[in-house]
């Protein structure tokens, strides 16, 4: 089953956090499948490198299903928990059940070779060790320094804890442990109490930085799928307008907000050309599209999908969105810029020349122009938050 799910993510474009939710198995088995899928995708480039090192056939000549079976088995040998004798047998059985009975000898031989000889030429370069694109490690090293870049790569290779927020006025659930972000909690057993809203503490921090008061007219740009929209709505602003460029995502987000008892306006518009008068809002959140590297713990496939070209295209878009937001906010009002990534161009590069500053009273690495949170710093998703006062 794990190999099939890996294939759907790697070749079918699905998201791992969504496919693992579909697994309908007893809890222990579901946990194992989740571990296999996440671990395999997290290490995919490194696993492919090891398969290439041991296989007589080039990767492209191996049937995609068989390659996925090998990837899962190689993950189990190198990083997994399964008993050694079980791994080749399970891999052979998976290949057979996927209709590749003739490949079982090949699969068996490769897995046993790995078990006998270990990883061929184990990597030492951090980008290869953590299966990150070289340009990502270069960017993070240049922007935050080598130690921070390494600490991030290591922490982003772990599972993310489940954190949640409680809605204003709701009682603190039994067992909830506060995090350093006001309003965000974890549970020691990873449970999500009834009525709590699952949300990473870094996203809770973004809304905290916005400082919404009941008399505020608030605009959120890049609002779907509505996670932060709901958190803003829970702070009872005077009005809330939510803009996104994608109609389908807006429909889904509006339904989500509706189910949770929220309301407000949903507007399909381009955040670089907003359909509002200047100075119409007290608070504007630009939760911009980005390379998403801060979410690698939940979406390990991001490492396979983003390119340096995406980074540069998104950074240009983000700058235009922030400029437009500054026009939409009234003098004395506030724009908050947030991205769940850590590349230099999408973080400091966007706000450096616009007078961004870090929000007060939130955990993370405080810089001249913003706040950096991340798995290595705050145990949260990676998030850059900058406040721009008008
Ligand atoms: C990081 S996601 C937003 C997440 C959302 N705020 C939440 O907390 O659930 C970025 C969003 O920006 C939207 N987007 C991309 N380009 C845009 C543009 N030019 N104008 C407005 N929205 C855009 C995407 O459709 C996506 O929904």
Image (spheres, rainbow, N blue to C red):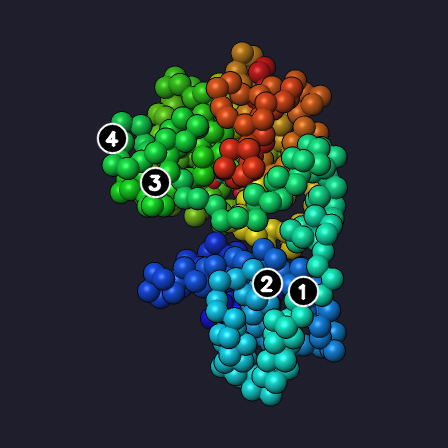
CB contact under 8 Å: marks 4 and 2: no
Between 242 and 198, which is closer to the camera in this rendering?
Answer: 198
If you read the primary sequence from the N terminus, does the residue marked by circle 3 or circle 4 appear first?
4
Q: Earlier in the sequence, mark 4 or mark 2?
A: 2
Could you tell which of marks 1 and 2 lies nearer the N-terminus? 2
Mark 4 vs mark 2, foreground winner is 2
Pointer 4 residue? 171
Please say if 144 is above or below 354: below
Decide if ligand 1 comes within 8 Å of the CB at mark 1.
no
Q: How many marks?
A: 4
Residue occupied by mark 2:
78
Q: Residues within 10 Å of mark 3 (few under 14, many from 20)?
A: some
Mark 1, secondary structure of its residue? loop
Mark 1 or 4, nearer chain start: 1
* Relative to 329, residue 4 above or below: below
Viewer-closest of 139 and 197: 139
Q: Are marks 3 and 4 in contact (CB under 8 Å)?
A: no
Q: Please give the label number shown on residue 159.
A: none
* Mark number, residue 187: 3
Q: CA distance from mark 3 to mark 4?
A: 15 Å
Q: SS class of the residue under badge 3?
A: loop
* Image marks 2 and 3: residues in contact by CB distance under 8 Å: no
Q: Position of residue 132 (x, y in %)?
A: 67, 50
Q: Position of residue 47 (x, y in %)?
A: 64, 63
- The residue wearing badge 1 is 119
In the picture, the quarter occupied by the C terminus is top right
């Amino acid at each position: 089953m794990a190999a099939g799910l890996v294939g759907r993510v790697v070749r079918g474009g699905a998201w791992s956090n969504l496919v693992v939710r579909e697994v309908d198995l007893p809890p222990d088995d579901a946990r194992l499948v989740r571990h296999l899928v996440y671990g395999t995708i997290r290490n995919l480039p490194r696993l492919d490198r090891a398969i290439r090192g041991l296989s007589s056939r080039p990767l492209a000549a191996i049937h995609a299903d068989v390659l996925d079976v090998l990837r899962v088995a190689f993950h189990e040998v190198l990083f997994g928990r399964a008993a050694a004798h079980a791994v080749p047998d399970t891999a052979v059985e998976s290949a057979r059940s996927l209709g590749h009975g003739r490949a079982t000898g090949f699969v068996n031989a490769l897995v046993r070779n790995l078990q006998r000889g270990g990883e061929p030429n184990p990597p030492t370069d951090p980008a290869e060790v953590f299966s990150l694109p070289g340009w990502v490690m270069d960017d993070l090293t240049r922007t935050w320094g080598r130690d921070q870049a390494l600490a991030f790569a290591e922490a982003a290779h772990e599972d993310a804890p489940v954190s949640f927020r409680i809605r204003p006025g709701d009682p603190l659930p039994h067992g909830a442990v506060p995090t350093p972000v006001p309003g965000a909690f974890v549970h020691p057993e990873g449970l999500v109490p009834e009525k709590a809203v699952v949300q990473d503490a870094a996203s809770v921090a973004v809304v905290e930085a916005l400082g919404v008061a009941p008399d505020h007219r608030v605009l959120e740009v890049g609002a779907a799928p509505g996670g932060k929209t709901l958190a803003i709505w829970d702070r009872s602003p005077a009005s809330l307008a939510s803009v996104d460029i994608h109609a389908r995502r807006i429909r889904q987000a509006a339904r989500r907000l509706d189910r949770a008892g929220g309301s407000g306006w949903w507007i399909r518009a381009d955040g670089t050309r907003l359909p509002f008068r200047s100075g119409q809002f007290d608070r504007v959140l630009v939760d911009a599209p980005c390379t998403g590297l801060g979410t690698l713990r939940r979406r390990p496939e991001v490492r396979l999908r983003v390119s340096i070209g995406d980074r540069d295209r998104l950074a240009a878009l983000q700058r235009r969105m922030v400029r437009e937001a500054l026009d939409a906010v009234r003098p004395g009002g506030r724009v908050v810029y947030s991205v769940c990534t850590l590349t230099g161009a999408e973080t400091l590069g966007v706000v450096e020349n616009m007078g961004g500053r870090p929000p007060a009273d939130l955990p993370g690495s405080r810089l001249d122009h913003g706040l950096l949170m991340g798995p290595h710093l705050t145990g949260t998703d990676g998030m850059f938050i900058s406040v721009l006062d008008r």
